[in-house]
Image (cartoon, helix red, strand yellow):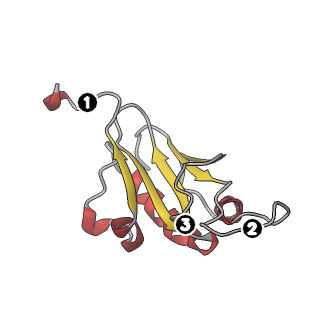
Amino acid sequence: MNDYAPVELLVCTTCRRGQELPDTEERPGALLHRALAAGELPEGVTLFGVECFSNCDHGCSIALRGGSRRWTYVYGNLDPSSADVVLDGVARYRATSDGLVPWRERPEHFRKNCIARIPPIEPPEAAK
């Protein structure tokens, strides 16, 4: 494994995937979080459940972030059965120093469902 900054995988646990659900029914976002927690996270990745990414009508949403020098990504249109796709994507993200996984190397779902790409807190040396 590399020595890059640890990665955080954030999952919106309040997501309803745009559906009307009774308050007593477990939400799709919580189900996705549970599926990811049951999976094998790559070394250096920590899973967090968070409340509302305000992407409610576009499936379950996740965010990948890590350290002050990595890009942060938000992905949507996921569902509780997407755990394997997310685990593949987070492993590829973790293997980078800057969070920039080449487009063709991203899981197909990530290529088509990127909600936001947020620059690192500390810009690369060349960009200063």
Q: Separation of disc 1 and disc 3 at Cα?
A: 31 Å
* Up-down relation of residue 83 to residue 12 (above or below): below
Q: Which residue is mark 2?
A: 21
Name the quadrant containing residue 65: top left
Disc 1 residue type (three-letter): Pro
Q: Identify the disc placed on residue 76.
A: none
On the rendered structure, is 95 left or right of 33?
left
Give coordinates of residue 62: x percent, y percent: 53, 55
Element carrying mark 2: loop
Nearer the observer: mark 1 or 2; the answer is: 2
Disc 2 residue type (three-letter): Leu
Q: Which residue is mark 1?
A: 123
Disc 3 residue type (three-letter): Gly
Q: Number of labelled discs?
A: 3
Q: Earlier in the sequence, mark 1 or mark 3?
A: 3
Element carrying mark 3: loop
Dot 3: within a 10 Å radius of its alpha carbon, few (fewer than 14), some, or many (20 or more) residues?
A: many
Dot 1: within a 10 Å radius of its alpha carbon, few (fewer than 14), some, or many (20 or more) residues?
A: some
* Up-down relation of residue 77 to residue 117 (above or below): below
Name the quadrant containing residue 13: bottom right
Q: Separation of disc 3 and disc 2 at Cα?
A: 14 Å
